[in-house]
């Protein structure tokens, strides 16, 4: 038999998200409905065989067979009349973040059939019915192969979680409030939400990016202000350090000058009244003698 890859992709929903784990659940494949790749699981009996194998399966990325591509495991499956559902746990933090942001919405099963029967449908299409299929793995992927896949994200947004963390660490802000759950949509609203999902998600991402840009701009401004204050304080400290030696030298000079002049009296006049009596008598006699000889004091 010609080797062929049989994958079936549908969107999932996420719940119970933490930093280290996210639980996702969705339809692994419908029963009796062909996908756009042109094959189907024909009945419940064949579906049960695959569902049982899935309980022991790993969760990967993009159907890669690399060990590094393993990001989680399938923990349970459910079989109904028209579909097989699964519950899986994701442990890769980057993938958890992308799921939480709504960037990843789809999962895809990979099967290797034991027997393939070609069937012509009423609309003229020829498809492959798979029997005795071996479950290979289930992957997180980008584009769904199942045309009618619907997705409703029930996980908390990353932005809400980040805001709650910052709020819990900020003074006078109180305790973080639990995120509000989105109300369940009525059946009619569900279809409208699916059709508008892509546009709404794009708008949400744009809005969140704008909020992040504003936050970054505000932080940048605060950092620049703190930087300017630090530079001013450093300049003032440097100026004071340079002026200190000159100031000390000036103070030292003033102290030396005060010490030299302190307590010294200088007579700058020849007025003999400033001298004691005994000195004044000698001075006057000496002065008279000099004047007789034509001299002066």
Image (cartoon, rainbow, N blue to C red):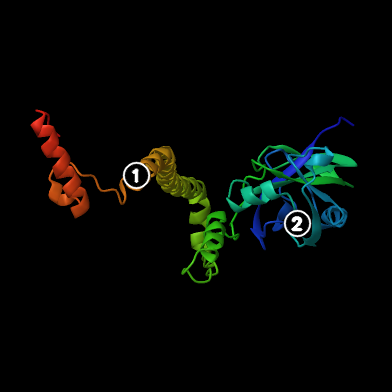
- Taking 266 as reference, is 191 above or below it? below
Q: Which residue is mark 1?
A: 260
Q: From the viewer's side, name the closer residue of 122 and 275.
A: 275
Q: From the viewer's side, name the closer residue of 210 and 39.
A: 210
Can the viewer see residue 154? Answer: yes
Q: From the viewer's side, name the closer residue of 264 and 206.
A: 264
Relative to residue 288, is residue 33 drawn left or right? right
Q: Label 1: how many residues lie within 10 Å, few (<14), some (14-19) or many (20+)? A: few
Query: Quarter of the image containing the N terminus?
Result: top right
| Foreground label between 2 and 1 | 1
Q: Which residue is mark 2?
A: 89
Query: Quarter of the image containing the C terminus?
Result: top left
- Taking 168 as reference, is 71 above or below it? above
Residue at 77% x, 39% y: name it. Answer: 63
* Contact between labelled residues 1 and 2, with CB atoms less than 8 Å apart: no
Report how far apart the C-alphas of labels 2 and 1 lie in the structure.
92 Å
Q: Which mark is residue 202?
A: none
- Can you give x and y, in whole percent of width and height, for residue 204 in the image? 47, 50
Residue at 52% x, 56% y: name it. Answer: 191
- Taking 88 as reference, is 284 above or below it? above
Q: Secondary structure at mark 2?
A: strand
Q: Quadrant of residue 125?
A: top right
Relative to residue 129, is residue 21 drawn left or right? left
- Taking 291 as reference, is 166 above or below it? below
- Compare marks 2 and 1 and give the one earlier in the sequence: 2
- Can you give x and y, in whole percent of width and height, for residue 150 in the image? 60, 53
Relative to residue 169, is residue 138 drawn left or right? right
- Can you give x and y, in whole percent of width and height, for residue 287 in the image? 13, 38
């Amino acid at each position: 038999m010609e080797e062929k890859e049989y994958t079936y992709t549908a969107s999932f929903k996420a719940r119970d998200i933490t930093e280290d784990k996210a639980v996702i659940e969705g339809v692994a494949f419908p029963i009796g409905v062909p996908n756009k790749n042109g094959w189907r699981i024909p009945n419940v009996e064949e579906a049960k065989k695959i569902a049982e194998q899935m309980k022991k399966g790993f969760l990967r990325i993009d159907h890669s067979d690399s060990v590094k591509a393993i990001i989680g495991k399938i923990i349970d499956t459910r079989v109904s009349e028209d579909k097989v559902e699964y519950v899986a746990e994701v442990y890769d933090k980057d993938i958890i973040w992308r799921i939480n942001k709504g960037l990843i919405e789809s999962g895809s099963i990979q099967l290797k059939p034991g027997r393939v029967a070609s069937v012509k449908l009423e609309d003229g299409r020829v498809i492959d019915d798979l029997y005795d299929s071996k479950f290979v793995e289930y992957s997180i992927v980008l584009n769904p192969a199942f045309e009618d896949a619907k997705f409703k994200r029930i996980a908390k947004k990353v932005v809400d979680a980040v805001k709650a963390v910052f709020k819990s660490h900020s003074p006078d802000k109180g305790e973080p409030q639990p995120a509000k759950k989105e109300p369940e949509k009525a059946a009619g609203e569900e279809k409208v939400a699916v059709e508008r999902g892509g546009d709404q998600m794009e708008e949400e991402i744009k809005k969140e990016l704008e909020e992040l840009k504003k936050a970054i701009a505000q932080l940048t401004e605060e950092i620049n202000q703190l930087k300017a204050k630090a530079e001013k304080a450093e300049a003032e400290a440097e100026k004071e350090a340079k002026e200190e030696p000159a100031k000390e030298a000036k103070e030292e000079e003033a102290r030396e000058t005060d010490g030299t002049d302190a307590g010294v009296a200088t007579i700058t006049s020849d007025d003999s009244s400033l001298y004691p009596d005994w000195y004044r008598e000698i001075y006057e006699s000496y002065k008279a003698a000099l004047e007789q000889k034509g001299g002066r004091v």
